[in-house]
Image (cartoon, rainbow, N blue to C red):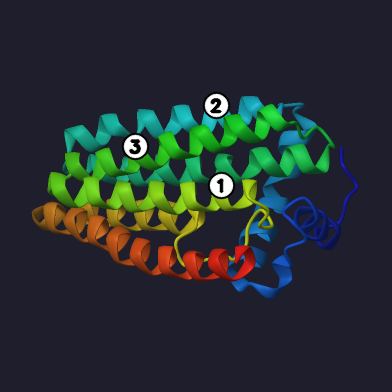
Amino acid sequence: MSTMSRSEYIAKWGQTHGGYDANASFLARTWLGFAYTFTRPLIAMRLTPNAITFLGLLISVVALWPAALGGRWAILTALLFLKAGLFDQLDGAVALMTDSSTKWGAVFDAVCDRISDGVFLVAFWLLGAPVWSCVLAGALMMIHEYLRARAAAAGMNEIGVVTVWERPTRVIIAVMFSLAAGIFVGSADIWAREASFAWIVLGVIGLFQLTRVVRKQLS
């Protein structure tokens, strides 16, 4: 089992993400500390990072089944999304703490994340959100991630800036609004719609934040 401390893990994470100081961001610091706590048992079980990545994606896809059933089943969707989001963070943590990071693993993780983001939107639609808002939310998410990837390839440090529209935020919204749809069944479609609207609003803000940093670093 890894003997790396929490602070060492956060520092090493920053080193592998373009020197980003995760301690300067409450969201990043909290999320990484949470991941560290749950990573150690997985290391003891000898699960590989890619296996954890795939399990997270599989769990998110399975969550569409209770979303399609609707009603109180949406609560199960929320719980599965929460578990999938946890696995999504833990794959990278395991790779970092066991020195098993690979370029293929990073690409595989990114692809699975985007598929999982799409699954969230499908769930919103199944719960009653309009198609147009789900499509627009998905487009903003993809532009955000594509901009960061292309900027990193052009020389920007890998993260650039932590915006309001990172993967953890998307997971949190999917969990919270799916849970609300399952609790308040009579207004499930409203909660689903508001979830897609939240994606749109935060997507616009996050894209603006990221664009400013990209332009500043690459100009």
Of pointers 1 and 2, the one earlier in the residue sequence:
2
* Amino acid type for the residue under numbered disc 2: Phe
Compare residues 184 and 168 and report the one nearer the observer. 168
* Amino acid type for the residue under numbered disc 3: Val
Compare residues 122 and 207 and report the one nearer the observer. 207
Q: What residue is rendered at 42% in x and 34% in y?
A: 115
Above or below residue 187? Residue 107 is above
Where does the image place residue 144, in percent across and percent down from the top left?
Answer: 44, 54
Confirm whether residue 139 shows in the render: yes
Residue position for label 1: 149
Q: Pointer 3: residues within 10 angstroms few (<14), some, or many (20+)? A: many
* Amino acid type for the residue under numbered disc 1: Ala
What distance separates the C-alpha of mark 2 from that of mark 3?
A: 14 Å
What distance separates the C-alpha of mark 1 from that of mark 2?
A: 22 Å
Q: What residue is rendered at 31% in x and 47% in y?
A: 138
Residue position for label 2: 54
Residue position for label 3: 119
Q: In this rendering, would 210 be left or right of 143?
A: right
